[in-house]
Amino acid sequence: MASWPTGRLLSTAARLVEHAWVEALDQLGLTHAGMVVLHLLDTGPLSQTELAHRARVQTQTMSRTLERLEQGGYVVRTRDEHDARRHAVARTDAGALAWARTRTLEADLFPPLENADALRAALLSIIAASSARRW
Amino acid sequence: MASWPTGRLLSTAARLVEHAWVEALDQLGLTHAGMVVLHLLDTGPLSQTELAHRARVQTQTMSRTLERLEQGGYVVRTRDEHDARRHAVARTDAGALAWARTRTLEADLFPPLENADALRAALLSIIAASSARRW
DNA sequence: GTCAAATAATCAGCTAGCTGATTGTTAGGA
DNA sequence: TCCTAACAATCAGCTAGCTGATTATTTGAC
């Protein structure tokens, strides 16, 4: 596996790491995609397009994630007064509570590494390079 | 985004990097999951369970990927003579040709990095840590 | 003022992961 | 020998990504 291309190592590592969260999140009725949204709403309500942009995801994908979050009572969507095309997405109390509970989950479950800073730097530069033409 | 947990950076980077392959592979009638299989068959036929194990994927997922590869003519599945539970999966000529064409694709499309070796080392240790209890 | 273009969200439909349950085959112990 | 446990593959059904097409609303040019 040491001969695998770096991109494939990246995909594989990401997928394996996600497994660790699923069990813990499942008990709270959350998914990882949902947790990302609850995090992004930390600073206040956002439109769906803005949420999708910040999560680096399509608006269609975000739409469905929000549908589930709303159904679970973690989020409310209300039509924007000034622009009826927009939905303002806000966390409910239940959403804020769930986020508080999972706050440190991602970091806690990540396997400890020697060169964690170098890894973060590399990932950020990959994201920056790949986001350029897309987001 | 610099404040995101490392695991989330990992997922996001992996997803963004995959976008780059899709277009190129699509023209060859391949998907990334399929390409991984064609690579794993480099050294000869394998059972589906073995393929799933090496790709770090469930056998159900592999089963479906192989179904599509076989349908596209890139792979053949034949029942094992000695153990009728097993399927021996082998590349066809078309499969070998497709693999030859995409051989360097993953590496070529990966954004150039300063500390690529450190990244690979970190990813390999993450995979090792996460694989331990699962594969 | 009207009509075309842009924008926000959604619908339809695809692949790739996953879990849980099922079918067919093999191997091993009573 | 038979019957149960293990194993290989698949079926059914879920979420999360994606593309392409559609609907409703707003904006802007004429």
Image (spheres, coloured by chain):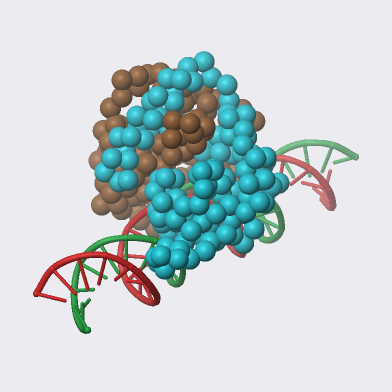
Chain colours: A brown, B cyan, C red, D green
Whether residue A7 is situated above or below residue A94 in the rendered picture: above
D7 sits to left or right of B79: left
> In the image, B7: left or right of B101?
left
Q: Residue B59: where, in percent of width, then height?
A: 41, 56
Q: Which residue is drawn at 25% across and 41% down?
A: A101
Q: Which image quarter: residue D8?
A: bottom left
Residue A79 in view: no
Q: Which residue lies furthest to the top in this view?
A: B114
Nearest the viewer among A23 and A68 is A23
Determine the residue positioned at 66% across, 45% down.
B98
Estimate the x, y position of residue A25 in percent, counting from the top left. 30, 47
Front-most of A43 and C18? C18
Q: In this view, does B3 lie to the left or right of B104?
A: left
Residue A107 image position (x, y, % from top left): 30, 31
Picture residue at 40% right of the left edge, 55% below the top: B49
Front one among D16 and A113: A113
Q: Which of B1 and A41 is in front in this view?
A: B1
- How many numbered discs, if any? 0
**Quarter of the image that includes the N terminus of chain B:** top left
Residue B73 in percent (x, y) is at 64, 58
Q: Residue at x 40, y 36 (%)?
A: A13
Query: Do we see residue A73 in this rendering?
Result: yes
Q: In this view, does D11 lie to the left or right of A72?
A: right
